[in-house]
């Protein structure tokens, strides 16, 4: 019963955060210079055309009415407006593109966890030995590699030189996957489309590797620091005194406690990976939400920019709720 | 005599800290020195005018053009060297802005507490939780390209990190007994903040600034790469890479090499320096970007 109370309280807090985020987004977009009407129209457009557009977009109303309209549209009618460029509803634009980004992000989070956490454990166990120094040095170096550099190098090596992997797009040219969830891999499995599945997987390798390099180094460092802290605890000494094998001590006793902060940080980076995804999507020509944001921002397509910002805010709030609930499940001490 | 003392001090330093820390710091400082030399003496080091267009279009590296030429026949190596001052100065401006604003807000907020503190913490947490690079990108696009605009965009997204760190230090120090003592002999609030609290935040700030510079250089280049950073013909690294990317698939690799290497060198150098300083100054892991 108590856990439900906690979840409920957390959801309420999430709702308040979302509301504040939406307010910040609304006012930021209106304070920033640059009249969207001037940008949309060619120079020297007659004043009456401008007036009509302003009226159509509701820009001639007082700002507090605009604000109320904005909140009403989001919370009551769940309508994010229409793109001023493509004339499609913003919600549709976002929802058709989000699966691409989600797939990319999840894939790179998996890769990072699979590589980063074991490396960190290894580094912690061999603390201050040559291997540890090597791992630490290279993780700082990896951390310093810009996403656009890594992506381009991967394209050049695996795509152009070795001709091993595709360097752009989500699936091969003549592969068709029936859309159920929009996540190509999941759809491939659901429809039993083996060709589509393998094509999507192959297309995902380079982008997700590119995106994960940064998180690998973050997770390695985090895991190492936490493992070292936990390995210094008294109960580890007890476990050693009992004569338990090293493997059991490290994986069963130490890792279980070290994993909690790693989980929190990992989830926090989920939201930040979406930022890195902007560049990755641009390099690998993936039709994701990052590309949508950049294109819309360049065209001053306010409804789309605003819609994407709202969408990111929603993701941020949802991940933070997941972090807190996951944290309370992993760590019995904080269970309220 | 004096040089002997210096050598002794350096030797003491070397024995005090681990080899890894010394290695980090020396590589880091060396690359920062390279950046400083490149940005101050670009006119003397660069063999050609970075803006000069010539008929030698897309020449591979040779003895005349060390790193080859780009689509407009401009010398890539000269542009990279001149690019240093743009990248470094935009990054430096943004980091100083973020650290300055973040620190002042945090000192006031942490010291006085109350409603202002709560409001600021909430606002900072909200900015912090938002994907920061996207935030910088959106601000950069909305403000339009320009030296100061890019710096503001990067700064706005990184203020919360500085705010958090400085505020947490302020909260600890303001409860110390000697602050109470200062107050009882009539010291004003601003005096206490300036004389006692701010100096104790400095070592954390040094680390923050170093790591922040690494981050800012990366972001400025990334914005340039996406076409929303400094605009051509400015020889900024990211902008040049965006230009060079168009001919990459037809086999022109040389135009991309030197800007990439410089971005990596700069980011790596500031990261290493930050990490090294963190260990030397004994600061814990919280100062992460």
Image: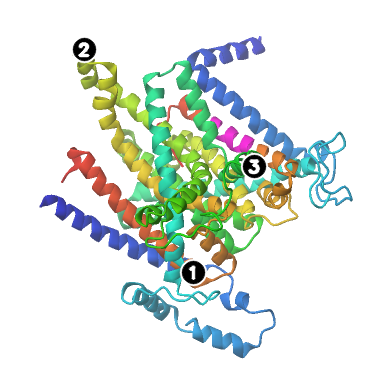
Chain bearing mark 2: A
Chain bearing mark 3: A
Q: Quadrant of residue A192?
A: bottom left
Q: Nearer the viewer, residue A176 or B18?
A: A176
Q: Nearer the viewer, mark 3 or mark 1?
A: 3
The residue indicated by pointer 3 is A156
The residue indicated by pointer 2 is A243
Chain bearing mark 1: A
Q: Point out the tag, 2 or 1, that comes first from the N-terminus.
A: 2
Q: Is residue A319 magenta?
A: no
| Left or right of residue B69, residue A1 in this image | left
Let me know if marks 3 and 1 both belong to one chain: yes
Q: Point out the tag, 3 or 1, that comes first from the N-terminus.
A: 3
Q: Nearer the viewer, residue B76 or B176?
A: B76
Distance from disc 2 to disc 3, alpha carbons, whole Å, reads 52 Å
Crowd tier of the residue under label 3, counting other residues whose Cα lies within 10 Å: few below 14, some 14–19, many 20 or above: some
The residue indicated by pointer 1 is A304
Q: Point out the tag, 2 or 3, that comes first from the N-terminus.
A: 3
């Amino acid at each position: 019963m108590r856990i439900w109370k906690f979840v409920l309280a957390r959801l309420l807090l999430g709702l308040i955060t979302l509301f504040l985020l939406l307010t910040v987004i609304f006012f930021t977009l209106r304070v920033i210079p640059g009249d969207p009407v001037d940008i949309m129209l060619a120079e020297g457009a007659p004043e009456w055309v401008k007036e009509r557009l302003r009226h159509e977009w509701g820009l001639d109303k007082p700002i507090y009415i605009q604000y109320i309209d904005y909140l009403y549209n989001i919370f009551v009618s769940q309508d994010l407006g229409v793109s001023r460029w493509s004339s499609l509803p913003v919600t549709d634009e976002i929802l058709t593109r989000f699966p691409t980004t989600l797939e990319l992000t999840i894939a790179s989070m998996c890769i990072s966890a699979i590589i980063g956490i074991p490396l960190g454990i290894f580094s912690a166990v061999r603390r201050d030995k040559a291997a540890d120094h090597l791992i630490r040095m290279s993780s700082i170096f990896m951390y310093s590699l810009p996403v656009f550099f890594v992506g381009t190098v991967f394209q050049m090596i695996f795509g152009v030189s070795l001709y091993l992997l595709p360097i752009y797009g989500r699936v091969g040219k003549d592969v068709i996957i029936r859309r159920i969830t929009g996540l190509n891999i999941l759809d491939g499995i659901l429809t039993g489309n083996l060709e589509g599945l393998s094509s999507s997987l192959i297309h995902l390798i380079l982008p997700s590797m590119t995106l994960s390099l940064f998180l690998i180094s973050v997770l390695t460092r985090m895991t190492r620091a936490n493992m070292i802290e936990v390995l210094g605890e008294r109960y580890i000494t007890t476990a050693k005194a009992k004569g338990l094998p090293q493997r059991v001590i490290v994986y069963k006793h130490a890792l279980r406690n070290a994993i909690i902060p790693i989980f929190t940080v990992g989830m926090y980076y989920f939201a930040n990976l979406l930022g890195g995804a902007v560049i990755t999507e641009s390099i690998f020509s993936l039709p994701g939400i990052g590309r949508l944001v950049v294109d819309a921002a360049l065209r001053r397509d306010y409804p789309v920019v605003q819609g994407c910002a709202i969408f990111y805010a929603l993701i941020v709030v949802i991940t933070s709720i997941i972090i807190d609930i996951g944290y309370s499940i992993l760590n019995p001490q904080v269970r309220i | 005599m004096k040089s002997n003392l210096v050598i002794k001090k350096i030797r003491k330093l070397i024995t005090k800290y681990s080899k890894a820390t010394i290695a980090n710091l020396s590589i880091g400082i060396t690359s920062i020195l390279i950046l400083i030399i490149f940005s101050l003496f670009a006119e003397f080091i660069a063999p050609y005018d970075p803006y000069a267009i010539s008929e030698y279009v897309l020449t591979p590296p040779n003895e005349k053009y060390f790193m080859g030429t780009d689509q407009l026949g401009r010398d890539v190596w000269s542009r990279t060297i001149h690019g240093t001052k743009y990248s470094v100065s935009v990054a430096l401006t943004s980091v100083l802005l973020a650290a300055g604003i973040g620190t002042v807000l945090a000192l006031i907020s942490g010291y006085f507490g109350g409603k202002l503190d709560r409001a600021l913490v909430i606002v900072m947490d909200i900015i912090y939780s938002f994907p920061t690079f996207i935030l910088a990108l959106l601000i950069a696009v909305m403000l339009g390209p320009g030296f100061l605009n890019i710096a503001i965009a990067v700064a706005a997204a990184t203020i919360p990190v500085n705010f958090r760190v400085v505020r947490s230090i302020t909260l600890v120090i303001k409860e110390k007994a000697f602050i109470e003592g200062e107050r009882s002999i009539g010291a004003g609030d601003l005096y206490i903040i300036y004389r006692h609290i701010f100096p104790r935040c400095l070592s954390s700030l040094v680390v923050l600034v170093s790591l922040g510079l690494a981050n800012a250089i990366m972001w400025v280049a990334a914005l340039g790469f996406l076409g929303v950073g400094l605009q051509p013909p400015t020889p900024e690294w990211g902008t040049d890479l965006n230009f060079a990317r168009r001919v990459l698939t037809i086999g022109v690799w040389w135009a991309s090499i030197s800007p990439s290497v410089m971005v990596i060198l700069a980011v790596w150098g500031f990261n290493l320096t930050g990490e090294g300083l963190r260990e030397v100054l004994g600061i814990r892991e919280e100062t992460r970007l």
